[in-house]
Image: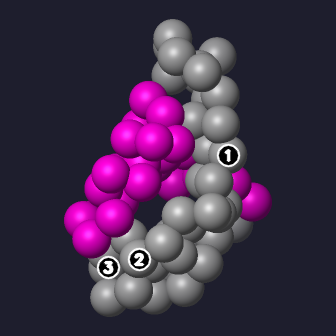
Amino acid sequence: MTMLIHYTSKKELKEHVGKPLAYTETSMFGNEYKPTGTFCGARRPHIEGGGREFFAEITMKDGVIAHIE
């Protein structure tokens, strides 16, 4: 599963390491977000409008972004 993340680029997302993640849950089968753990996120311009599409593997630690792949 991939949740929607609210950043215009992967570069902008990487600039937010150490801060909470801006996201929208998209799964009807339970939460994808984990305050500590790794999951996938995507920017989907055809849903949110404008910008470029990108995907990222996000690692969270204690509710803040720890690493972006």
Q: Secondary structure at mark 1?
A: strand
Q: Are marks 3 and 2 in contact (CB under 8 Å)?
A: no
Give the CA distance from mark 2 to mark 1. 16 Å
Quarter occupied by residue 8: top left
- With respect to residue 8, does 15 lie above or below? below
Between circles 3 and 2, the one closer to the viewer is: 2
- With respect to residue 43, does 20 lie above or below? below
Q: Quadrant of the N terminus?
A: bottom right
In the image, residue 7 lies at what x, y percent?
A: 41, 38
- Residue type for callout 2: Ala
Q: Which mark is residue 55?
A: 1
Within 10 Å of the Cα at label 1, are there few (<14), some (14-19), or many (20+) other Cα atoms? some
In the image, residue 34 lies at what x, y percent?
A: 49, 79
The residue carrying mark 2 is 66
The residue carrying mark 3 is 63
Residue at image position (64%, 16%) is: 46
Quarter occupied by residue 19: bottom left
- With respect to residue 44, does 41 lie above or below? below
